[in-house]
């Protein structure tokens, strides 16, 4: 009889699991349903654009998995794209957004977050999607300009009037200067910061790597707080009032000045910085499974249009379209920019500098 | 005598199979099988690799930081938690209900909010931080800051374990001590404290164990400096962000085992003490 | 933990003979220290949440808590708690029944396993479900084939929440039921009552306070969980963001006041449940004292 009871309770548990699984099915079947309905719609879309059909198409939903500083950009852009797509094809499209640290977001997609498109901070994080078969290895050739529709760079945000006289990288290691930058191990933006500093030191010291390492080590000795993400670092600098200079994305620097008071901060351009190219890609596996490839590709392609570029520029990303760039040239100062290729691409840079046991770990090892 | 009764009950009361079956099945599905995944994942590492990961200087430093800050936080909670429990059980004063409810708030407040709020208070430009700054005392972004966050997280564990025991405390024992001429303070040290010891230990260990694993509140106030204020859960997150699942699970496994042993020790100790009191 | 004992907290305290309590001076010093400590460690962060929330005025506050994303986060949070808490309550009762009414080997181990989620880092408790149900996980390929989404959807969030709140009800009931012993149930059984009858008529009335308290605590924790849910949520706006995650998002968007406004919402939900508990206690106390008078 006791055994019977045990069996009974197992059955109970089983039902509970099934109910849970059914929940999963449910929440998914919604999207799956819309996905199924989309398939004809999406495949129509190609023909529809040439010969508009009378029938209104079923609405479609995209999920754009992005990194932290693009929140404001994609709120505006999604609105614009929905309108454009509705006008062009008559189909309603809703774009859902997910933001977080670039690496964490890539990991979520690898672990099964059903992103139709990814728009991340660096190519390395999209490369990570290739191995599990989510994205084809040649993703970077799918869109113009290495699949980077906008660029940015690293600048200094200092307190109003620049009281510590910080004008270039070597000013950062002066006595009494505190630098705020996030942890390159957890933040994509922080890796650009680090590499820019490295590039500057290499140039100053005639490509002497030992000297460059020494410079970077000095620099991180001036960092009192190592936040885990770019936004966290901005908050530390801006809200908590810690540090004299924040190493930040150009767009983040402009945004914080705009959001938190132009009377409080100045932006300083160093003599040399790095060209950051945040890339975009369609997640092939998800887009094909859900039948959203057509609209997903159009979504990313439209970033290159005049309107897309305009929105990027308004959100302080450097447009690559020359006409739009010319219009905003006062906003984006020209400066010498090194690129990730100077470091042999992301894979090499990542292994050498940021992986466990890499140079960044060494500068924090005691005794060095 | 009590013992024999419990034994008899086995035959009289129904529902053992049902309740036991449900308990074990539920625990297995929700807790054990998922946790086993951590073990399985680490088997992908060779022993040497595993050892290299968990003895990396930064990892060791993070364990040390997690353990020392949790220890001091739990110790603080031990002293003040006992005091709060004592006051709540023994005295009558206005606002007692409010104080009593306040104890539960750290359970209820999302840890991230706690972290943000505490950082706002203790940052150099915050309410308390700005008072301490001239004294040369830095709280936010130091180990002291981590400890304060962990004190916040751990309070209810100590208070809520000590409170019921203190409540059920035998008046007679205390009275006997008084009749034998013991002073109040002496009664406390010699009679009350030893009786409370198991509950205090449980509360301490729960607060300690919770502190070791805490992430949400600490990450805002700690500053995350490698070797100085970087806690072990943050390193797990760091590894995950680098797509290093095995490294992450290796660190997690060590923490899991420590937590498990710690809890087992407390429960065993409690059981021993319970048995002794039954035997008496 | 506290158990139902708190229910008769107030009657007990007053009636201590003089010789086994402290002098008024010592008493008030101790009370002051306790209040000061709780004030500094707990009340101050809570108060700061409300002050920050209203810093930019009531309009910003209202806008923040009526924002569609905030409302959908609130709905999700309540839904998750609504699934997770009853399941854990049933589990807690079953576990406490088995552990307190019977003798068996490995009881300590079982109690330790129930405690384990208290001590597991929230980061780990999120990660384990990714390892199990994620696309690269043990069951990932099978789930994918059958088009079942667990992580980055409601089931994953529910599972992670259940995990972190498993011990609350059980931990509350075990010591209580152990202290109550088995006499009353045995008496009922000897009078011929059936299993469920014993439970509904005898056991449940005895443990209702502990049960309620456990439910309130696990509910509060379920609504406030951040670390574990953050790992399994996927952060899709308006879809898989719970209130704590929404707070983090607002904070990261430089909308500090708005983020504290939403946080204050959570605090108020917690306070509300505690108030309900206090009300119930007060009513039973009254009834109890009335019975005594009769």
Image (cartoon, helix red, strand yellow):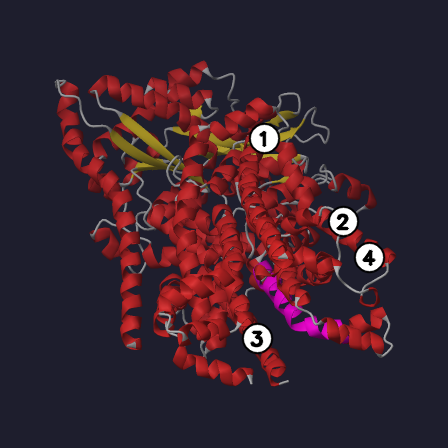
Q: The numbered mark 1 sits on a residue in which chain?
A: C
Left or right: B151 as drawn, with respect to C30? left
User: CA–CA distance between discs 1 and 2?
Assistant: 27 Å
Same chain under badges 3 and 1? The reply is no
The residue that mark 1 highlights is C257
- Residue at screen point 56% across, 39% down: C268
Same chain under badges 4 and 3? The reply is no
Q: Which mark is residue C36?
A: 2
Q: Mark 1 falls on what kind of element? A: helix
Q: Mark 2 falls on what kind of element? A: helix
Q: Nearer the viewer, mark 3 or mark 2?
A: 2
The residue that mark 4 highlights is C27
Disc 3 crowd rating (10 Å Cα; few below 14, some 14-19, many 20+) is some
> Does residue B202 show up magenta in the picture?
yes
Q: Nearer the viewer, mark 4 or mark 3?
A: 4
- Residue at screen point 31% across, 40% down: A115
């Amino acid at each position: 009889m006791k055994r019977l009871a045990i069996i009974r309770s197992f059955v109970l548990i089983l039902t509970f699991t099934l109910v849970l699984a059914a929940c999963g099915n449910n929440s998914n079947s919604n999207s799956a349903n819309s996905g199924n309905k989309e398939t004809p719609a999406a495949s129509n879309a190609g023909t529809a654009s040439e010969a508009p059909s009378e029938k209104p198409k079923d609405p479609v939903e995209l999920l754009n998995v992005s990194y932290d500083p693009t929140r404001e950009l994609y709120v505006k852009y999604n609105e614009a794209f929905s309108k454009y797509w509705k006008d062009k094809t008559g189909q309603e499209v809703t774009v859902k957004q997910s933001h977080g640290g670039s690496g964490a977001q890539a990991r979520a997609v690898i672990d099964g977050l059903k992103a139709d498109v990814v728009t991340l901070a660096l190519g390395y994080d999209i490369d990570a999607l290739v191995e599990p078969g989510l994205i084809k290895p040649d993703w970077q050739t799918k869109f113009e300009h290495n699949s980077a529709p906008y660029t940015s760079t690293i600048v200094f945000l200092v307190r109003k009037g620049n009281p510590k006289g910080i004008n270039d990288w070597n000013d950062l290691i002066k006595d009494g200067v505190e630098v705020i930058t996030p942890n390159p191990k957890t933040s994509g933006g922080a890796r650009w910061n680090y590499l820019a500093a490295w590039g500057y030191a290499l140039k100053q010291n005639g490509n002497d790597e030992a000297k460059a390492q020494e410079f970077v080590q000095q620099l991180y000795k001036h960092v009192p707080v190592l936040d885990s993400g770019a936004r966290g670092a901005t908050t530390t600098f801006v809200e908590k009032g810690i540090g004299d200079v924040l190493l930040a994305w150009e767009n983040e620097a402009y945004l914080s000045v705009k959001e938190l008071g132009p009377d409080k901060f100045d932006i300083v351009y160093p003599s040399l910085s790095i060209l950051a190219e945040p890339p975009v890609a369609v997640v092939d596996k998800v887009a094909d499974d859900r039948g959203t490839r057509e609209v997903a590709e159009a979504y990313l392609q439209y970033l290159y249009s005049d309107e897309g570029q305009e929105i990027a520029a308004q959100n302080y990303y450097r447009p690559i379209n020359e006409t739009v760039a010319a219009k905003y040239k006062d906003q984006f100062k020209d400066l010498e920019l090194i690129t990730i290729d100077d470091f042999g691409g992301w894979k090499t840079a990542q292994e050498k500098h940021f992986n466990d046991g890499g140079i960044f770990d060494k500068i924090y090892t005691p005794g060095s | 005598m009590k013992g024999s009764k419990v034994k008899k009950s086995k035959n009289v009361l129904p529902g053992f199979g049902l309740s036991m079956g449900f308990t074990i099945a539920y625990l297995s599905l929700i807790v054990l099988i998922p946790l086993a995944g951590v073990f399985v994942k680490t088997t992908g590492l060779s022993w040497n690799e595993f050892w290299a990961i968990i003895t990396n200087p930064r990892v060791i430093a993070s364990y040390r930081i997690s353990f020392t800050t949790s220890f001091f936080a739990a110790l603080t909670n031990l002293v003040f938690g006992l005091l709060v429990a004592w006051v709540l059980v023994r005295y009558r004063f206005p606002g007692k209900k409010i104080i009593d409810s306040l104890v539960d708030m750290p359970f209820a407040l999302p840890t991230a909010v706690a972290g943000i709020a505490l950082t706002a208070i203790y940052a150099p430009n915050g309410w308390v931080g700005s008072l301490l700054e001239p004294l040369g005392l830095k709280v936010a972004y130091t180990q002291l800051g981590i400890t304060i966050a962990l004190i916040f997280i751990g309070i209810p564990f100590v208070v809520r374990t000590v409170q019921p025991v203190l409540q059920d405390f035998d008046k007679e024992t205390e009275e006997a001590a008084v009749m034998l001429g013991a002073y109040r303070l002496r009664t406390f040290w010699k009679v009350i404290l030893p009786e409370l010891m198991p509950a205090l230990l449980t509360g301490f260990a729960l607060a300690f164990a919770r502190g070791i694993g805490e992430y949400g509140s600490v990450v805002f106030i700690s500053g995350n400096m490698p070797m100085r204020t970087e806690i072990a859960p943050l390193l797990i997150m760091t590894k995950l962000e680098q797509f290093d699942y095995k490294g992450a699970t290796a660190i997690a496994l060590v923490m899991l085992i420590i937590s498990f042993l710690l809890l087992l020790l407390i429960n065993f100790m409690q059981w021993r003490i319970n048995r002794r009191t039954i035997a008496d | 933990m506290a158990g139902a004992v708190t229910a008769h907290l107030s009657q007990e305290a007053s009636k201590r003979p003089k010789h086994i309590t402290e002098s008024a001076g010592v008493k008030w010093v101790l009370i002051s220290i306790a209040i000061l400590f709780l004030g500094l460690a707990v009340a101050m962060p809570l108060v700061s949440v409300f002050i920050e929330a209203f810093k930019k005025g009531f309009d910003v506050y209202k806008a923040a808590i009526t924002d569609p994303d905030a409302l959908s986060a609130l709905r999700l949070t309540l839904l998750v708690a609504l699934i997770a808490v009853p399941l854990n309550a049933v589990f807690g009762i079953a576990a406490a029944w088995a552990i307190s009414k019977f003798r068996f080997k490995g009881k300590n181990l079982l109690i330790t396993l129930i405690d384990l989620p208290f001590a597991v880092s929230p980061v780990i408790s999120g990660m384990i479900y990714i390892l199990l149900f994620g696309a690269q996980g043990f069951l990932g390929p099978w789930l994918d084939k059958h088009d079942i989404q667990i992580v980055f959807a409601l089931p994953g969030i529910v599972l992670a929440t259940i995990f972190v709140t498993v011990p609350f009800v059980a931990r509350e009931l075990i010591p209580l039921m152990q202290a109550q012993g088995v006499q009353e149930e045995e008496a009922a059984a000897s009078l011929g009552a059936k299993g469920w009858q014993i439970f509904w008529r005898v056991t449940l009335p005895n443990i209702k306070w502990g049960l309620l308290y456990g439910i309130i605590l696990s509910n509060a924790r379920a609504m406030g969980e951040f670390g574990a849910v953050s790992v399994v949520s996927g952060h899709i706006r308006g879809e898989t963001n719970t209130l704590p995650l929404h707070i983090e998002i607002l904070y990261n968007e430089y909308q500090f006041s708005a983020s504290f406004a939403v946080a204050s919402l959570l605090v108020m939900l917690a306070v509300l449940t505690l108030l309900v508990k206090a009300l119930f206690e007060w009513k039973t106390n009254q009834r109890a004292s009335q019975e005594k008078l009769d």
